[in-house]
Image (cartoon, rainbow, N blue to C red):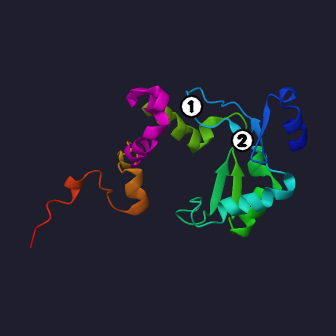
């Protein structure tokens, strides 16, 4: 495919080759404006396992920041149901993988979080063209906000302490 696209780029408008890598144009499905890359690198099936391992097994990958989960709840994405992901979960000894009902976002806590993030972006971001630059602040705000049901912030429930949101939390440092 790399050769075909390289030789006849006009015949393949959804494809491109850069530095020997094949890319496919995958338009964003998000209703929010985004400056995320829509060109996705195409990985040959023979290299899928290697690519997943190199991106997941590294201590820097941050997929298991809080350790390996006991169970994982996913939507019905084909990438989660695939053999490669299933073997990765077995290798890390994840006890159970649950898939939520199709077309039923109410049972997926991630969808609820996405709704909250979308609301925050719409309400508090002044320049919607650069909303992604503010995600760290949005994350901090959501993680330190008190939840009306539990009465605690997600940060407090994860770390068993209040996470400082400013230097005033600590008080003054003495010179002595």
Q: Quadrant of residue 77?
A: top right
Q: Quadrant of residue 134?
A: top left
Q: Residue at x 86, y 57 (%)?
A: 46
Query: x, y percentage for residue 42?
Result: 78, 45
**Does the magenta-highlighted stretch encompass residue 113?**
no
Q: Residue at x 33, y 61 (%)?
A: 161
Spot the residue most to the left: 176
**Does the magenta-highlighted stretch encompass residue 131?**
yes
Query: x, y percentage for residue 95?
Result: 69, 65
User: Would you name the residue on which mark 1 appears?
Assistant: 34
Q: Which residues are magenta?
A: 121-143
Report if residue 116 is visible in the image.
no
Quarter occupied by the N terminus: top right
Query: x, y percentage for residue 88?
Result: 73, 63
Location of residue 61 with respect to 135 vertically, above or below: below
Q: Residue at x 43, y 45 (%)?
A: 136
Position of 114 compared to 167: left or right?
right
Checking the image for residue 56, the label placed there is none
Spot the residue most to the bottom: 176
Location of residue 22 with respect to 34 vertically, above or below: below
Position of 90 compared to 109: left or right?
right
- Judging from the image, what secondary structure is the residue with disc 2 in? strand
Q: Quadrant of residue 127?
A: top left
Quarter occupied by the C terminus: bottom left
Checking the image for residue 40, the label placed there is 2
Query: x, y percentage for residue 87?
Result: 78, 63
Quick one: label 1, few (<14), some, or many (20+) residues within 10 Å?
A: some
Q: Nearer the viewer, residue 84 or 147?
A: 84
């Amino acid at each position: 495919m790399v050769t075909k696209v390289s030789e006849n780029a006009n015949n393949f408008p959804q494809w491109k080759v850069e530095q020997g890598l094949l890319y496919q144009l995958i338009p964003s499905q998000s209703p929010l404006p985004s400056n995320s890359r829509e060109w996705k690198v195409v990985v040959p099936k023979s290299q899928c396992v290697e690519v997943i391992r190199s991106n997941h097994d590294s201590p820097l990958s941050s997929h298991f920041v809080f350790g390996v989960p006991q169970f994982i709840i996913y939507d019905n994405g084909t990438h989660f149901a695939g053999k490669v992901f299933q073997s990765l979960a077995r290798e890390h000894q994840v006890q159970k993988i649950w898939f939520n009902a199709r077309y039923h976002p109410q049972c997926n806590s991630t969808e609820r979080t996405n709704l909250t993030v979308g609301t925050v972006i719409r309400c508090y971001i002044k320049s919607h063209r650069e909303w992604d630059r503010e995600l760290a602040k949005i994350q901090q705000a959501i993680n330190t906000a008190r939840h009306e049901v539990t009465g605690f912030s997600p940060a407090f429930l994860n770390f068993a302490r209040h996470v400082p949101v400013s230097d005033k939390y600590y008080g003054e440092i003495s010179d002595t």
